[in-house]
Amino acid sequence: MKLLFVEDEPVLAEEMTTYFSSLGYLCEQATTFNQAQEKINAYHYDSIVLDITLPDGTGMKLISTIRAHDADTGIVIVSAKDSLPDKLEGLNLGADDYLTKPFYLEELNARINALYRRKTLKGNSNIIFDDFTVDPLSKTLLYKDIEISLTKKEYELLMFFTVNKNRVVSKPSIAEHLWGDHFDQADNFDTVYVHLMNLRKKLSHHSQKDYIKTVYGMGYKFTLS
Amino acid sequence: MKLLSKTSISYLWVSFTVLAITGVLLFQLLRKFVSDETREQLELQTEMVAIALQNDQQISFPLVEITPLQAKKNDQLPIFRDTLIDDFVQQKKEGYYYLKEKKVIHGAPFMITVMTANIGWDGYSQAILFIFIIMACLLLLAGALVNYFINKRLWDPFLINLERLKQYSVSSQTALHLVPSAIDEFKELNEVTADLAKRAREEYTSLKEFTENASHEIQTPLMIIKSRLESISQRSIDEVVARYLVDTKQAVDRLSRLNRGLLLLAKLDNDTFPDQEQVNLNVILQNLLLQMGDLFEQRNMTLQTTLKIKKVDGSPYLLEILITNLLSNILQHAPKESEIRIELDANHMLFSNPGAPLEFSADKLFARFGKESKKQNGNGLGLSIVKQICITHHWDIAYSYLDHCHAFEITF
C-alpha cells in the first residue's frame, strides 16, 4: 500500500511515517500545500492522510485535485479542529473519513485499511494469518474450513489487532475503537479484557497458539510468532 | 409602582392643592369686590337720602330708616355689616348688608340706615366648591386619558424594547433590534443599550473564539505527546517506567477528553450545527444500546427498554453525544446488577437507574465541573453537555430521585 501523509507538524509526520513504514507500507510525506499538490499530480497513492490546516493553504482544496486523478484513493482528513462543518465539507468534497486530533495511530491505521479493502481491493481481500482466514465481507473467521463464531465486538477487536500486528496496543485505544471517543473509557477496561480473553480463547482453542500477548500495564500485542 | 402611576398620583395631589387654594382665593376675592361695590352703592344711597331730607323731599327709597341720633353713639358710625332679616314673602331669613351713617340735616344729627340684599354667600361657596370638584374630576379624567395615549404612543416602543432586552442573549444568533423612538431620552437609551449589547456580544464572541482557538491549538501538542508516548511504549522498558508511562498516558487522555468537552460546549453555546435533519431518535438510541450493550452486560445490568418510534428535528451528531453521555453516566454511577429503565415515546425520553442519593445538591448536576464527589471518573462536563444539547434542541431536561432511583427525563 502506498501512502501520502500531508502534515505540517514534523513530529507527527515522522511518527506516522515511522509506524506505517514498519507495517511494510510505502510512505511519503508532504509538509506544505504546494509540495502535496506536486506529489498528488505526479504519483498515485492508495491512501492520503490530509491535515487540512497547512501553512500555505487549506487541505480542503487538495481533495478535488486528488479526486480528479483517482476516484479510489482513500482520503482521511486529520484535523485539530473538531469541527462538524469542516467534516461535512470534507466528506462532501470527496474525502472518505475524518479524524480529530489527538487520535491513536492504530485507529488511523484501522481506518486506512478499511478504506483500502473497500476501495482498492473492492472487498475481495481475505486476511490470512497462519491457518486462519478473516473474510471482511461476511465478517466471519475460519480456521482451515471450520467457521469460528465471533461476537461483533470480538470481530472488531480481531480486525483491529490484525492491522496493528506486532504493536503494543493500549487499552484506551482499543476501548475508543470499540465504543467511540465521546466518553471516558477508563471504566470499560474490564470489558475490553473480557472480550480479549474470549477472542484469545477462541483463537487458541483451534490453533493451540496464543496470538494476543499481555504487555504488563501497557496493553496487548498481536503477534504471529 | 409604575412611573406613570407615580406621576399621575403626584399630578393629582398637585391639582387638588392648586384647585383648593384657587377656590378659596376666588371666593374671598369675589366676596371682597362684591361687598366693596355694595358699600359704595349704600353710601351713595345714604347721601341721596340725606340730600332728599335736606331739601325736605319725600323719602321714597325702600329699606331706609332715619332716626335722630344721641350724641353718645357718634363715635361708632359709620357701620357697614351684614345681617339677617325676615323675608316675609319667602318665609325665611335672608342675608342683607346695612350701612348706618351719621348725617347732619338742618343742624340736627340723624342716623340713616340703608340696606340691600346680599347675594347669599353660602350658595356662592357651594357653587364654587361644586365647580371646582367637577374641574378636579375632569382634570383627573383628562390626565388619565392623556397618560393612556402617551402610554400607547410614547411608552410602547420603550416597553417593546424592554421585552426584547429581556429576551436578548449575547450568545444567541439574533442581533438586538430596538424600536426607534422620537423621544430624545429614549433615543439616547436605545443608542446606549444597542452599543452595550454590541460590545457585550463582541467580547463574548472574542472569548468564545479564544476558547475555540485555544482548544484547537492544544490538540496538536496533545497528539504529539500521545504519539510519542505510544512510541515509547513499543520499546522494552522496565516495570517502573511502564507504570509512569501508563499514568502519563491516562493524564493525557483525560486532558484531551476535557479539551474536547470544553470545545464542544463552546460550540454549543453559539454555533449552529449544520447537520439538522429529521432523525429517528429511537433508531439512534437502539444503535447505541447495541453498541454499548456489552458494557451493560459486563456489569450485569438489565435494560428495561420501552421504545416507541419518535422522530425529531435535530443534529444526529449531537443527539448521539446526548444519548452516549446519558448512557455512560449510568455505566459510571449505577451499581452492578441493577435494573436500568429507558423509555422513549412521543413526549419524553427517560433514563433511570437505582443508586444512593446524590452527595451534593442536584442544582450542581448540570453545572460545568459541578460534581463534588471525586470518587468517579469523568471530567464533570458530560451532563452539562447533555443539558446544553437539550437547550439547543429546545427541550427540557429534569433530574429526579424517587424510590432510590435517579432519573433523567427529557421532555420534547
Image: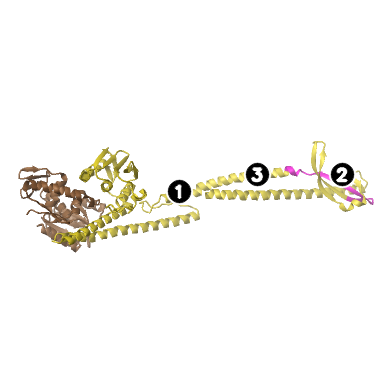
Q: Please, which chain is the residue tagged with disc 3 on? A: B
Please indicate whether residue A125 sits to the left or right of residue B268 in the image.
Answer: left
- Find the residue positioned furthest to the right: B107
- The colour one sees for chain B in the rendered image is yellow
- Does residue A40 appear anywhere in the picture? no
Secondary structure category for the residue under label 2: strand
Task: From the image, tell me which residue sits under label 1.
Answer: B160
Q: Which quarter of the figure is the C terminus of chain B placed in? A: top left
- The colour one sees for chain A in the rendered image is brown
Question: Disc 1 or 2, which lies upstream in sequence?
Answer: 2
Q: Which residue is depicted at the point 50% across and 49% down?
A: B155
Q: Which mark is residue B48?
A: none
Please indicate whether residue A92 sits to the left or right of residue B72 in the image.
Answer: left
Please indicate whether residue A134 sits to the left or right of residue B289 in the image.
Answer: left
Image x and y of residue B250, in percent: 22, 57
Task: From the image, tell me which residue sits under label 2.
Answer: B64
Front residue (pair B263, B118): B263
Which amino acid type is marked by label 2? Val
Q: Which residue is depicted at the point 73% across and 49% down?
A: B28
Which amino acid type is marked by label 3? Ile
Q: Are marks 2 and 3 on the same chain?
A: yes
Which amino acid type is marked by label 1? Ile
Image x and y of residue B249, in percent: 21, 58
Question: Disc 2 or 3, which lies upstream in sequence?
Answer: 2
Closest to the camera, between mark 1 and mark 2, is 1
Find the magenta span and give its range: B102-123
Residue B115 covered by magenta stretch: yes
Q: Please, which chain is the residue tagged with disc 1 on? A: B
Q: CA distance from mark 1 to mark 2?
A: 78 Å
Task: From the image, tell me which residue sits under label 3.
Answer: B133
Q: CA distance from mark 1 to mark 3?
A: 38 Å
Image x and y of residue B41, in percent: 82, 48
